[in-house]
């Protein structure tokens, strides 16, 4: 026995043994299978929470074990008795008060010279606290392993001893690459030595460190981490390491940055902007909204229904209903200011949705269009007056010119050779005035039309042939002809196409300084359009005017070679989705090039 070797008395050894049982939660038992007797030490009575006078049988002792473990214990005890097989198991017992305890059960066998079991003795240790610590440690490890935050543990020198999977994912470094290194592998260069000196001073003193760190991934990308470093302390308060928890807030910081930009843009916008709940209650408005509606600050409007700001709340409610049904709405509404005055606003509203497509708010923008609508009304009235004036003037001019041309033609038989040339000039000028009235008609119809220009398939060859014939009749002293055939295709145009050709052909003849003007027309078909060139032998167009010749500033009837006809040409061609340009030939004439889209 131990106490004999140590020179202890039996009494001393027994006391020491009891003390060990009390401290270690250990109990010892012996079972004699021959006499079927079982003895418990004091430690077993404590573990089972029973009085010391209790004398259990082997069956009673096994009965203390948890029902899930009872059959297993019976089997290992039987094998120990019958086969001399020792055992060591972690099981559970149910104490007399119903509480469950974790225990480690160990048993060994003593046999006689025949091999028959004479004694089965064992040790029972209460390991409940240890098992609880193991469970907590396992749960903690599982939590750390599954955490979305990057976690690493270092010793007091900063050498990394552990990283979790999230650390690998967020930083790009594997555990193998990281263990044995220091957190300096994440250093982005954003901080100086004094910063890190302050960090170490804080954590070595046993305090937590919190900071938003700009670190660097393995691939060199910057990353922003909300970092907390806490010391790991022993029971006596000594620091034995550190744990760092790092939450990746890179995306959040970028969103905050974008939000700041959006907020700045919203506050700087000239348009009124409002954000409301799905029920139509205002949450936020920008300064332009307050100014537009005449409120001093945002708080005076926040929390109110959007329908309160419109002259017709019913119409506003219908708009909210339409947005709920379709997701967006735009149109005009009459708004009412704080002082009761009204103005006309153009509103564009739609849902603000989450990444999953769920509506979270209603956002609207507003533009005060009162002045614009007033201007539109004035412009409409002016256009109507202009159109009426155009009809009257054209009618009177054409009637008067018809009389003048009629009398001039009558005079052809009554003038001598000297007067014939003057008479031709009179007739030519008169016909030119009639053509100008036609140009004026086309121009007014183009600029005053409120309707969208309607385009339709228009045959190029027939329109150009007709206009070519009319120009040849109008200018018998000019050579106007086509080179090659005109493609038999349809253009995306309308009835105004003839006005385009008429004005370009007139321009080529009327502003020609040769005794006999020569005008040549060519057309070439491409995949999507037709290119038409009108070449003349006149003086050409000065380079300084080639960029502005089709401009609005060159539209006066008195301007030389840059009249309203060319401005009209540019307007009509643009409506067709085509373009027109001018250049000079090497021999001095002008070349006007039209590109007109074909019917798709």
Image (tube, rainbow, N blue to C red):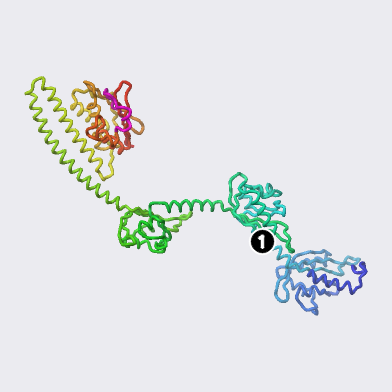
Residue placed farthest to the top in the image? 417
How packed mark 1 is, by other alpha carbons closer than 10 Å (few <14, some 14-19, many 20 or more), is few
Residue 388 in view in this figure: yes
Return the x and y of residue 198 as percentages of the image width and height. Answer: 66, 54
Residue 277 in view in this figure: no
Rendered image quadrant of residue 597: top left
Residue placed farthest to the left in the image? 414
User: Image point 7% across, 27% down: which residue?
Assistant: 410
51 left or right of 410 in image: right
Rendered image quadrant of residue 336: bottom left
395 left or right of 197 in image: left
Q: Is residue 504 above or below residue 176?
A: above
Return the x and y of residue 118 as percentages of the image width and height. Answer: 87, 69
Total marks placed: 1
Rendered image quadrant of residue 10: bottom right
User: Image point 77% across, 66% down: which residue?
Assistant: 104
Residue 219 is one of the magenta-drawn residues: no
Q: Nearer the viewer, residue 27 or 513?
A: 513
370 left or right of 478 in image: right
263 left or right of 92 in image: left
Span shown in magenta: 530-549
| Circle 1: element type | helix
User: Image point 17% across, 41% down: which residue?
Assistant: 391
Question: What quarter of the picture does the N terminus occupy?
Answer: bottom right
Return the x and y of residue 483 as percentages of the image width and height. Answer: 28, 23
Q: Nearer the viewer, residue 191 or 145?
A: 191
Return the x and y of residue 113 as percentages of the image width and height. Answer: 91, 66
Question: What quarter of the picture does the C terminus occupy?
Answer: top left
Q: Which residue is mark 1?
A: 139
């Amino acid at each position: 026995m131990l106490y004999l070797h140590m020179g202890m008395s039996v009494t001393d050894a027994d006391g020491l043994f009891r003390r060990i049982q009390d401290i270690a939660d250990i109990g010892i038992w012996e079972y004699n299978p021959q006499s079927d007797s079982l003895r418990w030490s004091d430690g077993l009575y404590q573990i089972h929470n029973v009085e010391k006078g209790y004398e259990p049988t082997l069956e009673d002792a096994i009965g203390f074990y948890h029902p899930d473990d009872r059959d297993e214990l019976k089997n290992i005890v039987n094998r120990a008795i019958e086969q001399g097989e020792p055992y060591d198991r972690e099981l559970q017992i149910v104490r007399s008060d119903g509480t469950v305890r974790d225990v480690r059960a160990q048993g060994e066998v003593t046999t006689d010279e025949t091999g028959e079991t004479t004694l089965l003795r064992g040790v029972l240790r209460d390991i409940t606290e240890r098992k609880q610590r193991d469970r907590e440690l396992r749960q903690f490890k599982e939590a750390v392993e599954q955490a979305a935050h990057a976690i690493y543990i270092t010793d007091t020198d900063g050498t990394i001893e552990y990283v979790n999977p999230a650390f690998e994912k967020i930083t790009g470094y594997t555990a193998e690459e990281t263990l044995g290194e220091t957190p300096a592998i994440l250093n982005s260069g954003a901080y100086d030595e004094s910063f890190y000196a302050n960090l170490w001073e804080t954590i070595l003193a046993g305090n937590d460190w919190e900071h938003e760190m700009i670190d660097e991934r393995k691939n060199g990308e910057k990353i922003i981490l909300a970092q907390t470093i806490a010391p790991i302390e022993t029971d006596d308060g000594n620091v034995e390491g550190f744990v760092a928890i790092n939450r990746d807030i890179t995306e959040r910081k970028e969103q905050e940055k974008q939000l700041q930009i959006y907020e700045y843009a919203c506050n700087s916008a000239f348009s009124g902007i409002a954000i409301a709940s799905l029920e139509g209650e205002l949450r936020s408005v920008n300064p332009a909204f307050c100014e537009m509606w005449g409120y001093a600050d945002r708080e005076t409007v926040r929390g109110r229904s959007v329908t309160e700001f419109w002259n017709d709340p019913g119409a506003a409610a219908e708009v909210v209903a339409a947005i709920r049904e379709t997701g967006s709405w735009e149109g005009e509404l009459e708004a009412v200011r704080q002082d009761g005055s009204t103005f006309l606003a153009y509103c564009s509203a739609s849902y603000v949705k989450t990444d999953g497509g769920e509506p979270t708010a209603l956002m609207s923008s507003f533009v005060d269009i009162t002045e614009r609508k007033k201007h539109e009304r004035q412009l409409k009235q002016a256009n109507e007056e202009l159109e009426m004036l155009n009809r009257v003037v054209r009618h009177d001019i054409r009637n008067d010119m018809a009389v003048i041309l009629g009398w001039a033609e009558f005079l052809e038989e009554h003038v001598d050779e000297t007067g014939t040339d003057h008479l031709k000039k009179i007739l030519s000028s008169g016909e030119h005035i009639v053509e100008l009235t036609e140009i004026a008609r086309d121009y007014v119809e183009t600029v005053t039309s409120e309707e969208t220009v309607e385009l339709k398939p228009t045959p190029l060859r027939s329109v150009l042939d007709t206009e070519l014939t009319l120009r040849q009749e109008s200018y018998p002293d000019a050579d106007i002809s086509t080179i090659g055939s005109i493609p038999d295709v349809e253009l995306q145009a309308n009835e105004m196409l003839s006005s385009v050709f008429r004005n370009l052909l007139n321009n080529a003849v009327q502003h020609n300084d040769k005794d006999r003007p020569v005008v040549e027309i060519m057309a070439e078909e491409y995949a999507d359009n037709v290119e038409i060139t009108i070449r003349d032998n006149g003086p050409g167009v000065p380079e300084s005017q080639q960029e502005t010749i089709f401009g609005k500033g060159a539209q006066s009837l008195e301007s030389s070679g840059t009249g309203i006809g060319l401005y009209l040409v540019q307007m009509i061609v643009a409506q067709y989705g085509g373009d027109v340009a001018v250049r000079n030939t090497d021999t001095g004439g002008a070349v006007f090039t039209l590109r007109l889209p074909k019917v798709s």
